[in-house]
Amino acid sequence: MLVYSLFRVNIADLELVVEKSSRLDIVFIQKHGPEIYRSLYESLEQANNTVENIEAVYTTLALLCVELSSEETVTEMLRLLVGIQVQ
């Protein structure tokens, strides 16, 4: 059973700090990103997929976007997200 709760968060109250990804992280995701993205995409195509798996994939993508997003990697992430939506 899926249960969604709707709430509003004032982002200013969170006092978030934006930090640039390290060069090592960028090199890692450039080297291994396509394989990681392909695996995530293929896991969504499974016929016996569960809601938990779909949520896990989306959570993983969100974490990758937050932690490893850079000008060099955002294109691959966007391609994957568009591919998921088209599917």
Image (cartoon, grey):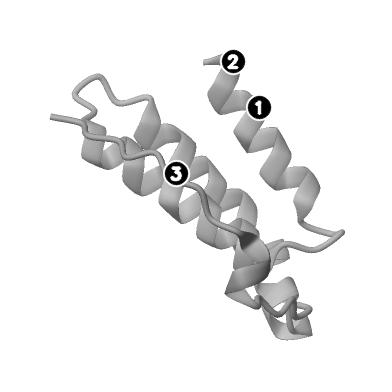
- Callout 2: SS: helix
Q: Residue 58: which numbered mark, if any?
A: 3
Q: Which residue is mark 1?
A: 82
Which label's residue is closer to the chain start, 3 or 2? 3
| Kind of residue sitting beneath label 2 | Val
Q: Residue 49: horizontal and vertical position, in percent?
A: 24, 28
Q: Which residue is most to the left?
A: 1
Q: Residue 21: horizontal and vertical position, in percent?
A: 74, 78
Mark pair 3, 2: CA separation: 15 Å
Q: Nearer the viewer, mark 3 or mark 2?
A: 3
Q: Quadrant of residue 13?
A: bottom right
The answer to which of 39 and 10 lies nearer the viewer is 10
Tag 3 and tag 2, C-beta contact below 8 Å: no
Task: Tell me the residue at 61%/25% (across/down).
Answer: 83
Q: Which residue is mark 2?
A: 86
**Taking 78 as reference, is 19 above or below it?**
below
Q: Which residue is most to the top?
A: 86
Which label's residue is closer to the chain start, 1 or 3? 3
Q: Residue 59: horizontal and vertical position, in percent?
A: 43, 51
Mark pair 2, 1: CA separation: 6 Å
The answer to which of 33 and 10 lies nearer the viewer is 10
Quarter of the image with the N terminus is top left
Task: Tell me the residue at 23%/40% (across/down).
Answer: 52
